[in-house]
């Protein structure tokens, strides 16, 4: 058991599952995804009004499989291009975004995509993304089968423009 991963995993499982089975989550970190391969939770995309050509998707991946897996890409029919990206700040506080080849998900562990970090970039949107809607995206993995996942469309943080 990886102690450093446990607090993050428990918080993510409790917040994302919404199933009311918090007692099980507190006893064993792998409960949320044990024996089920890659489990996706808290999948959402940022709302994008008409005229805004880009958005980003975020999620948490938990690996209950027996081998390390990695998110390698995503397919979304509502965008001309979909890429994995990582945002970072340099020593001067300047933000940059670079393509990400994959996002590893260790056995019994998790990997998250969140604002300010790794994300799924949706480029060349063909229609607005309205808060409250859901959109389907197919996630592609190394060492795990593809999964079609519903992403909730959410508004950006108050005052946020990204």
Image: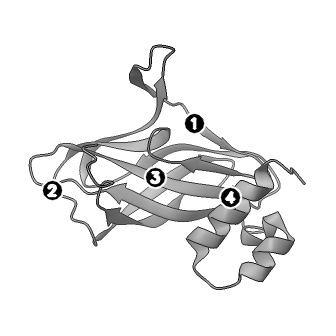
Label disc, if present, on residue 55 of the rendered structure: none
Q: Check the picture and name the quadrant holding the C terminus.
A: top left
Labels 2 and 1 touching (C-beta < 8 A)? no
Q: Nearer the viewer, mark 3 or mark 2?
A: 3
Q: Is residue 84 visible?
A: yes
Question: Which residue appears at 42% of the width and 44% of the height?
Answer: 120
Q: Which residue is mark 4?
A: 62
Label disc, if present, on residue 127 of the rendered structure: 2
Q: Which residue is mark 3?
A: 58
> Does 146 sit left or right of 77 as displayed?
right
Q: Between residue 114 and residue 36, name the one nearer to us.
A: 114
Q: Is residue 145 visible?
A: no
Q: Is residue 60 above or below residue 134?
A: above
Q: Which residue is mark 1?
A: 102
**Secondary-structure class at tag 1:** loop
What is the C-alpha distance between the residues marked 4 and 3? 14 Å
N-terminal of the two: label 1 or label 4?
Answer: 4
N-terminal of the two: label 3 or label 2?
Answer: 3
Question: Which residue appears at 83% of the width and 55% of the height?
Answer: 66
Residue farthest to the bottom, as pictured: 20
């Amino acid at each position: 058991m990886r102690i450093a991963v446990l607090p993050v995993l428990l918080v993510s499982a409790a917040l994302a599952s919404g199933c009311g089975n918090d007692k099980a989550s507190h006893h064993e970190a792998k409960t949320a995804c044990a024996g089920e391969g890659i489990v996706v939770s808290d999948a959402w995309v940022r709302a994008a009004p008409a005229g805004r050509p880009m958005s980003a998707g975020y999620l948490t991946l938990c690996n209950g499989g027996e081998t390390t897996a990695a998110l390698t890409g995503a397919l979304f029919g509502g965008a001309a291009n979909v890429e994995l990206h990582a945002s970072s700040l340099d020593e001067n506080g300047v933000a940059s975004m670079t393509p990400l080849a994959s996002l590893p998900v260790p056995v019994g562990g998790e990997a998250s995509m969140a604002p300010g970090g790794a994300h799924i970039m949706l480029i060349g949107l063909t229609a607005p993304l309205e808060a409250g809607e859901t959109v389907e995206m197919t996630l592609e993995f190394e060492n795990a089968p593809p999964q079609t996942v519903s992403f909730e469309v959410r508004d950006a943080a108050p005052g946020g423009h990204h």
